[in-house]
Image (cartoon, helix red, strand yellow):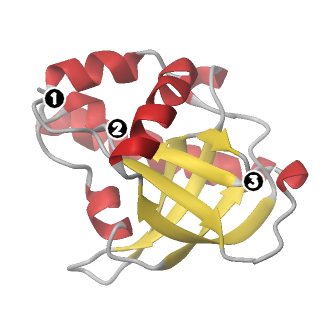
Amino acid sequence: MASDLQWWLFGQFTKAHVALYRLTGGNLLPGPLGRSKTVLVDHVGRRSGERRTTPLLYALDGADVIVVASKGGSHRHPAWWLNLREMDETEIRLGGERRRVKVREANETERERLWPRVVEVWPDYAKYQERTQRQIPLGILSPADPDPDPGNI
């Protein structure tokens, strides 16, 4: 398990990543050390009421953006997921594009279909799932616009 110092350092890296992403439209630092693409996901702290932005790896499923609430295989859900799952809609940024999305958790059938896709994006997700007894949730962020253009992602 990560120490408090490790989580603090991770938080500082996350803040820098968000700032660089916004500054460059996601082009300077597209993912962890440039290996994978990230999406910025806005959410509101369920207790604090503070607006937050979290950079997350993602996979696409048509017009849907799939995010993984892994927290590195921790036995607890990440705070961003606890916040996000209480929201009906939020805003994301893919590259330079901002869009409204509806938020929901993948059901078991969807998870079975989507899990291999997210593991392809980041193979460590499989290790994270082995590390914890909780089932790692997959979040599905679907366009709130009834006529999305999936070719625009």
The location of residue 53, given as percent across then percent down, is 49, 62
* SS for dot 1: loop
Of the numbered discs 3 and 2, the one sitting upstream in the chain is: 2
Disc on res. 10: 2
Q: Nearer the viewer, residue 150 or 76?
A: 150
> Are circles 2 and 1 on residues that touch, CB within 8 Å?
yes
The location of residue 3, given as percent across then percent down, is 12, 32
Quadrant of the frame with the N terminus: top left
Disc 1 residue type (three-letter): Ala
The location of residue 19, given as percent across then percent down, is 61, 53
Disc on res. 23: 3
Residue positioned 52% across, 78% down in the render = 89
The location of residue 51, given as percent across then percent down, is 43, 76
Disc 2 residue type (three-letter): Phe
Calculate the distance from the C-alpha at mark 2 to the C-alpha at mark 1: 10 Å
Place residue 82 in its image quadrant: bottom left
Calculate the distance from the C-alpha at mark 3 to the C-alpha at mark 1: 30 Å
Calculate the distance from the C-alpha at mark 3 to the C-alpha at mark 2: 20 Å
